[in-house]
Amino acid sequence: MTTLQYKFVELIPDEIEPGTIYITLEYCTAIHKCICGCGNEVVTPISPNDWKLTFDGKSISLYPSIGNWRFPCRTHYWIVKNQIVIAKDKLDDKPKKKKKKKWGFL
């Protein structure tokens, strides 16, 4: 398993180092480089409707999982106590949108 370091910062730095997640509580945001090595920056807003951040004094966890649907790598993983837990499946298919029912009128 890969370990991710965390840094609590006031502002997100211009250069994001691989293997580090930067967390700004003032702006309720975390950012890190995709763990696959593609170089894309993954931004996770922290709020009741988005991701939840847990800090136990030694490690951080983010919930729910991170699914990079828009990146070519389509990597899917969790961050649990500074550890990267890769999902067994890659994101091969985009989430299926529910089809709207078409109502016919007589």
Image (spheres, rainbow, N blue to C red):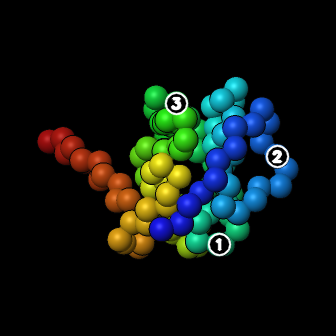
Report the residue marked by disc 2.
13
Q: In the rendered view, tell whether residue 26 sits above or below residue 83.
A: above
Q: In the rendered view, tell whether residue 64 sits above or below residue 68.
A: above
- Relative image position of residue 87 (x, y in whole percent): 39, 66
Which is closer to the viewer, label 3 or label 1? 1
Q: CA distance from mark 2 to mark 3?
A: 21 Å
Is the Cβ of the residue at disc 2 closer than 8 Å to that at disc 3? no
Q: Please rate how many residues cluster around mark 2, counting C-alpha atoms within 10 Å: few if below 14, some from 14 to 19, many from 20.
A: few
Report the residue marked by disc 3.
47
Residue at horizontal 34 percent and vertical 59 percent from the top: 96
Q: Which corner quadrant of the image does residue 17 belong to?
A: bottom right
Disc 2 marks which amino acid? Answer: Pro
Q: Mark 3 falls on what kind of element?
A: loop
Q: Quadrant of the C terminus?
A: top left
Horizontal side of 66 relative to 43 (left or right) equals: left
Q: CA distance from mark 2 to mark 1?
A: 19 Å
* Residue 10, visible in the rendered structure: yes
Q: CA distance from mark 3 to mark 1?
A: 27 Å
Disc 3 marks which amino acid? Answer: Ser
Report the residue marked by disc 1.
37
Residue at horizontal 49 percent and vertical 53 percent from the top: 79
Which is closer to the viewer, label 2 or label 3? 2
Q: Earlier in the sequence, mark 2 or mark 3?
A: 2
Q: In the rendered view, tell whether residue 25 sits above or below residue 84.
A: above
Horizontal side of 61 relative to 89 (left or right) equals: right
Is the Cβ of the residue at disc 3 closer than 8 Å to that at disc 1? no
Is residue 59 or residue 38 the one in the foreground?
A: 59
Q: Please rate how many residues cluster around mark 3, counting C-alpha atoms within 10 Å: few if below 14, some from 14 to 19, many from 20.
A: few
